[in-house]
């Protein structure tokens, strides 16, 4: 059973790395801290991918300084889905 789980983890890692390498941009929802998403954002930065980090200030929680303080990321605090869509559209338009 353990070997099976390790195999699944390896497949997920390989798949996600392929997605990162083949992507043109990265758009990440980072309201809830995630080691996996943080790792993927770090890899994307090393691959020189444009990165948009969307987050909501919920319950007084703030975005991690490691994300917000990175000047290569575009970070946007959104209130609802419509506002998030506007930030995504602006981000993509600025890349053209």
Image (cartoon, rainbow, N blue to C red):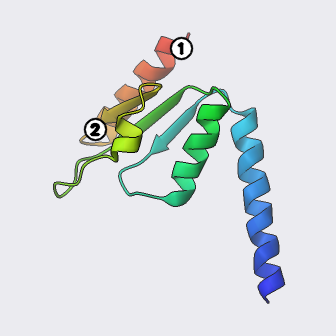
Q: Residues within 10 Å of mark 2 (few under 14, many from 20)?
A: some
**Circles 1, 2 touching at the beta carbon (< 8 Å):** no
* Residue hosting label 1: 95
Q: Is residue 38 above or below residue 75?
A: below
Q: Is residue 92 left or right of residue 67?
A: right
| x and y percentages locating residue 31 in the rendered image | 35, 51
Measure the C-alpha gap from mark 1 to mark 2: 20 Å
SS at badge 2 = loop
**Foreground pick, 95 / 84:** 95
Q: Is residue 4 left or right of residue 39?
A: right
Q: Residue furthest top?
A: 96
* Residue hosting label 2: 78
Q: Is residue 79 left or right of residue 91?
A: left
Q: Quadrant of the C terminus?
A: top right
SS at badge 1 = helix
Q: Which residue is found at the position 24% from the left and 41% from the top?
A: 79
């Amino acid at each position: 059973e353990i070997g099976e789980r390790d195999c699944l983890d390896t497949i997920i890692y390989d798949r996600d790395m392929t997605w990162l390498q083949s992507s043109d941009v990265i758009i990440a929802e980072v309201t809830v801290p995630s080691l996996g998403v943080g790792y993927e954002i770090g890899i994307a930065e090393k691959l020189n991918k444009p990165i948009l980090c969307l987050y909501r200030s919920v319950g007084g929680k703030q975005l991690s300084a490691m994300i917000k303080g990175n000047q290569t990321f575009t970070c946007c605090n959104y209130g609802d889905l419509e506002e998030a869509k506007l930030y995504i559209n602006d981000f993509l338009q600025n890349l053209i």
